[in-house]
Image (cartoon, helix red, strand yellow):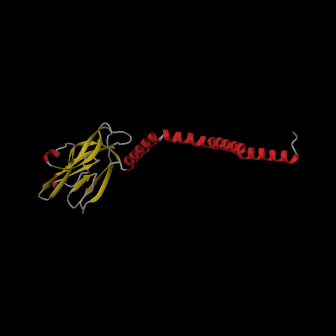
């Protein structure tokens, strides 16, 4: 049996149409799939790397924020004075008190430190605020925990801080001078509290 030219042409056309419709499309899909997979490989590795880091990153950022806050907000002990009373504290004070000086305290949790407490008691002239190393404020009213002071000096915190009692004014305060700045009538040095840094 001999095939005529039109029949052969029709058969070839059908074969080419089948090839174009199914084989080429499938090949294209396969190649396209391989291309997409290859393109996503770097993303997969990147995602895997970032997925392995969150704990360290989160912990680091949390720790970083904590450290940065502590560093930026390192506790500061401030000395204020009103007409007759000194108030040394790391917290807020009432109106009428003027800032006289500041010192840097240790960050919470620092080793080789001790705690300072803010205390007050009443006098005929008004309140007398004072700093104590005793939690019970030596039998007086405790206002707050002021922070930690270093036990020993270092290059970072070389300043000795003393508690002074200005008996003539019925006024306690702290000073970095062992003579308690020699106010009128003199002031008694009641002992060294510890060491602080420059604020």
Left or right, residue 90 beside residue 51: left
| Residue 152, horizontal then vertical, whole percent | 31, 37
Q: Residue furthest left?
A: 124
Left or right, residue 84 beside residue 159: left
What residue is shown at x 81% (from left), y 47% (from top)?
10
The residue nearer to you, when weighing 170 against 183, is 170
The residue nearer to you, when weighing 125 against 181, is 125
What residue is shown at x 32% (from left), y 52% (from top)?
102
Left or right, residue 85 beside residue 104: left
The residue nearer to you, when weighing 85 against 57, is 57
Q: Is residue 197 visible?
A: yes
| Residue 107, horizontal then vertical, whole percent | 34, 44
* Quadrant of residue 30 within the rendered picture: top right
| Residue 3, horizontal then vertical, whole percent | 86, 42
Left or right, residue 118 beside residue 122: right
User: Is residue 56 positioned above or below 143 on the image?
Assistant: above
Image label count: 0
The residue nearer to you, when weighing 56 against 161, is 56
Q: Is residue 186 visible?
A: no
């Amino acid at each position: 049996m001999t095939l005529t030219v039109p029949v052969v042409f029709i058969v070839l056309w059908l074969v080419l149409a089948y090839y174009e419709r199914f084989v080429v499309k499938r090949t294209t899909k396969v190649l396209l799939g391989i291309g997409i997979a290859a393109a996503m490989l770097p993303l997969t590795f990147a995602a895997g790397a970032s997925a392995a880091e969150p704990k360290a990153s989160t912990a680091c950022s949390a720790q970083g924020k904590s450290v940065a806050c502590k560093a930026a907000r390192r506790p500061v002990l401030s000395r204020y004075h009103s007409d007759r009373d000194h108030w040394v504290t790391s917290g807020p004070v009432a109106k009428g008190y003027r800032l006289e000086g500041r010192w840097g305290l240790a960050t919470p949790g620092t080793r080789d430190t001790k705690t300072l407490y803010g205390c007050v008691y009443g006098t005929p002239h008004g309140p007398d605020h004072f700093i104590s190393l005793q939690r019970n404020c030596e039998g007086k009213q405790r206002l707050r925990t002021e922070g930690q002071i270093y036990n020993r000096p270092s290059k970072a915190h070389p300043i000795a801080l003393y508690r002074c009692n200005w008996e003539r004014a019925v006024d306690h305060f702290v000073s970095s001078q062992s003579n308690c700045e020699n106010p009128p009538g003199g002031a008694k040095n009641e002992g060294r509290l510890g060491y602080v840094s420059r604020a």
